Amino acid sequence: MLFEILITIFQWLIAVLGAPLLVGVIRKTKALLQGRRGPSVLQPYRNLRKLVRKQMVISEATSWIFRITPYVVIATMLLAALIVPVLSTARPVEFLGNIVLLMYLFLLGTFFLSLAGLDAGSSFGGMGSSRAMAIAALAEPTVMIAIFAIALRAGSTGLNEMIRASITDPLLMLNPGHLLAFFSFFIVALAETGRLPVDSPSTHLELTMIHEGMVLEYSGRYLALIEWASAIKLFVFLALLGNLFFPWGVAITLTPATIALAMLALTIKLGVLTVSLAVLETGLAKLRLFRVPELLGGLFMLSLLAVVSFFFLR
């Protein structure tokens, strides 16, 4: 029991402290692909340290919602990092790994960020909030249905049980429904984390901002918390993609050898997904806003097909 608690804390620390490094690797890879030297992979840590030391500037028009949102957002992402199995499926408390609880946490963070964008009274914040909620209304059901396609085959909505079922049945990953769910989940993960082609994490063009529009009024420590939460959310989605759809190396039994193998497997999976994400963002342009619902609607149908295939292709 004590070893399970220590491993849970250890993999939580990997997700929380390693998330900015993942962002740095993506930025460095994109720079190299574009023929630039690019910043160091440790630059996100330096940015967070710089923001924490800076003075905050808060508009007098804001209310308590604006001030509490950064803490709500970081708290939801810290709890989400605790829920997702990063190295092992062994948990001292099994109900923490429920996918429904995870989706509620993502929605809660998006909801408060949208409220904060409106609360500041900025026109750009209002546009970013309305766009974020429109995307969330299509993206969140798609994520739920894509994972539900895996849950049907596992017989449980628990992430730990779904990973164990995939490990015990290797042929499940060749199932057409499994592949459809992976593809739809991967693209929707880009929308959820504000990546191309849905949103650009580096844009500051007022008429195209979505996530940046909502946090435009934040500075100092508040902005550091939001940026850190965004990095953790990206790490959580990539860990879900790697461990849920390709669970090789995830430790079922807790021994030093299995944990070391799980760390190696996690590094390889995140490396492949990170490079794939950088290549995708380098080769794609941002979609026009009115094309985003078409993309997400198509992905919703793919995830629905993944669920329907369970009843016909077993």
Image (cartoon, grey):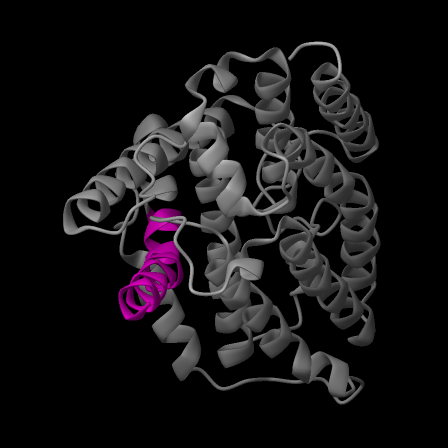
Magenta span = 1-24
Task: Tell me which secondary structure the magenta stretch mostly adopts.
Answer: helix
Residue 38 point in image, percent of width and height? 30, 42
Residue at the location (70% across, 29% down)? 287
Observer-nearest residue: 27 or 133? Answer: 133
Return the x and y of residue 234 as percentages of the image width and height: 50, 48
Image vertical order of residue 58 relative to residue 269, above or below: below
Q: Quadrant of the C terminus?
A: top right
Q: Is residue 197 visible?
A: no
Q: Is residue 134 located in the magenta-colored stretch of the structure?
A: no
Residue nearest the viewer, comparing 163 with 147: 163
The vertical placement of 217 against 138, above or below, is below
Residue 83 in picture, x, y percent from top left? 51, 58
Q: Quadrant of the N terminus?
A: bottom left
Residue occupying image coordinates x 49% and y 46%: 160
For the point 83% across and 61% down, the residue is: 126
Residue 30's spot in the image, x, y percent? 38, 34
Q: Which residue does the image show at 54% across and 45% down from the upper left?
A: 159
Q: Nearer the viewer, residue 141 or 310?
A: 310
As drawn, the residue found furthest toward the left would be 257
Task: Examine the rendered structure and indicate whether residue 302 appears above or below residue 205.
Answer: above
Quadrant in which residue 168 is drawn: top left
The number of numbered discs placed on residues in the rendered structure image is: 0
Left/right of residue 228 with respect to residue 157 in the rendered view: left
Q: Is residue 8 magenta?
A: yes
Residue 284 visible to an observer of this rendering: yes
Relative side of 204 to 119, left or right: left
